[in-house]
Amino acid sequence: GIQVEQSPPDLILQEGANSTLRCNFSDSVNNLQWFHQNPWGQLINLFYIPSGTKQNGRLSATTVATERYSLLYISSSQTTDSGVYFCAVGSNDYKLSFGAGTTVTVRA
Amino acid sequence: DVKVTQSSRYLVKRTGEKVFLECVQDMDHENMFWYRQDPGLGLRLIYFSYDVKMKEKGDIPEGYSVSREKKERFSLILESASTNQTSMYLCASSPLYSGTGVETQYFGPGTRLLVL
């Protein structure tokens, strides 16, 4: 299956700081999604972004499919941004392969 | 809004017990999935279903089975629970495979299972 590596594994931010999370994948994909898991365990889809750039409020994501990576940007971080961010990829079937996640802690 | 519900948030079972985890979605999605989440490993796919009574093994199906008798409901069954099945279990659903890749997956709140 497709291997997915996320970096960094852990990130501690001061409120208001900006950050970049990275996702590298081992093969061509036609599906890439970013998820946020809050401290209570709920996973929420942030972006469906197999290529290109998207923005949603303080979050944005860019996928460069030809170079097999995606970046998630968090700007002006808030304590509510804390949690685990997962990158998941897939190609030509129903399955998604998830990375191990980046745990983000935003301190007030 | 899509709603995916799971029957329990927390569950404690004994080794050898048969365990049922239920998942219901209300958006008429064709695809449904069961994952387990363990620290440092992300989410791993156990089984998925693309239609009623249809199922396919994911990456770690051993020790698990599934049932999908109705479109909205997907059950995960641990035939004989073991301590190494202690984990967080997450159910998800998504619309029909479009040919360009699986559409967005929507997740339930998860069930934390402890097997003693």
Image: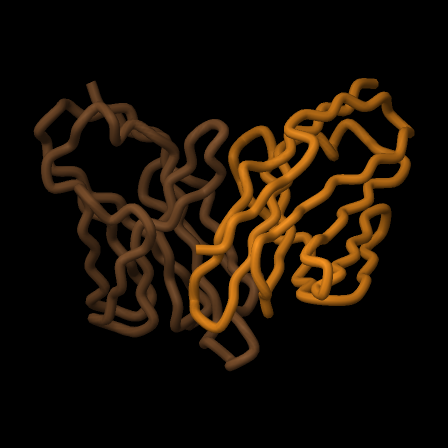
Chain colours: A orange, B brown
Q: Does residue A63 lie above or below B36 as drawn?
A: below
Left or right of B82? Residue A15 is right
Question: In percent of the image, x 36 and y 46: which residue is there?
Answer: B6
On the image, the x and y values in percent for residue A90 come to: 52, 62
Question: In percent of the image, x 26 and y 44: which residue is there?
Answer: B21
On the image, the x and y values in percent for residue B116 come to: 20, 18
Left or right of B14? Residue B47 is right
The N terminus of chain B, quarter of image:
bottom right
Q: Residue furthest bottom?
A: B99
On the image, the x and y values in percent for residue B36 come to: 37, 40
Image quarter of residue B20: top left
Left or right of B86? Residue A61 is right
On the image, the x and y values in percent for residue B68 come to: 23, 64
Left or right of A97? Residue B49 is left
Nearest to the observer: residue B67 or residue B27: B67
Nearest to the observer: residue B87 or residue B101: B101
Question: In percent of the image, x 74 and y 59: which residue is there?
Answer: A63
Q: Does residue B37 lie above or below B35 as drawn?
A: above
Question: In percent of the image, x 19 and y 59: which residue is there?
Answer: B67
Tally of numbered tags = 0
